[in-house]
Image (cartoon, grey):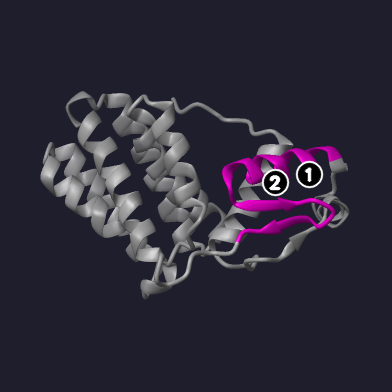
Amino acid sequence: MSKVVHRTIREQIVSHLRTEMLTGQLSGGERLREQHLAERFGVSRGPIRDALLQLTNEGVLVARQNRGVNVREMPSETVRPLIVDLRRRLETFALDTIFDDIRPEDLEGWRVNLKSFGTACEQQDMPVVVERDIAFHRSIVERAGDGGLTAIWLPIITHMLLPYSRHRSLLESFREHGGILAAIESGDRALAVERLQQNIQ
């Protein structure tokens, strides 16, 4: 039986804002105002302040004295290939590290994620698509059991737009994730690493 995860108001707000930044709905340099966000989400300013602080600590937002909080500018096209390469190196290192110790519960968690991801792709539900996409990759990094690795990975993933536009259909992204999982299930380390690298662009 899958575990039901209840997220706090802060976590839900963080997820929404992160999705909007990763998909370009919030532009680099755009200012985020506590009062406006509190009205938008129908909450007090406390959870908003906590959410903005978390995203600032992650490096997604930039806080400037007397100037509020702004969305960090996305990397230029010159820098982006370097960031993509760093992300590939981190995630493939994590997958290679855990490959011989992947447990049935790991596979089941990835299958549940993939099913939810596929449904979101079919329904064009972008917030859930982004959330499930990131959750899959994050689970691989976290499974490596080194908090420092996750701390390095998180700012990288949140400093780049997720280029779903490269697909003719969101289901192509779903199939890429399915291909990674199929390779893991078959025990083909090299193929799993190759498919993971191809998915990160």
Residue pointed to by mark 2: 13
Give the residue displayed 45% in from the left and 50% down from the top.
156
Where residue 108 appears, x then y in whole percent? 33, 32
Where residue 152 appears, x then y in whole percent? 43, 40
Tag shown at residue 119: none
Q: Nearer the viewer, residue 44 or 112?
A: 44
User: Does residue 26 show up magenta in the picture?
Assistant: no
Name the kind of residue labelled 2 in the image.
Ile
Name the kind of residue labelled 1 in the image.
Ile
Q: Quadrant of residue 71?
A: bottom right
> What distance separates the C-alpha of mark 2 from that of mark 1?
7 Å
Q: Where does the C terminus fall, quadrant-wise?
A: bottom left
- Relative placement, left or right, of 120 versus 95 is right
Give the residue displayed 43% in from the left and 67% down from the top.
164
In the image, the segment drawn in magenta is 46-72
39 over 6 or under it: above or below: below
Where residue 84 appears, x then y in whole percent? 35, 58
Give the residue displayed 35% in from the left and 60% down from the top.
82
Neighbour class for label 1 at 10 Å: few (<14), some, many (≥20)?
A: many
Q: Are marks 2 and 1 in contact (CB under 8 Å)?
A: yes
Q: Nearer the viewer, residue 114 or 184?
A: 184
Name the outermost residue toward the bottom: 168
Residue pointed to by mark 1: 48
Q: Mark 2 falls on what kind of element?
A: helix
User: Does residue 71 show up magenta in the picture?
Assistant: yes
Q: Mark 1 falls on what kind of element?
A: helix
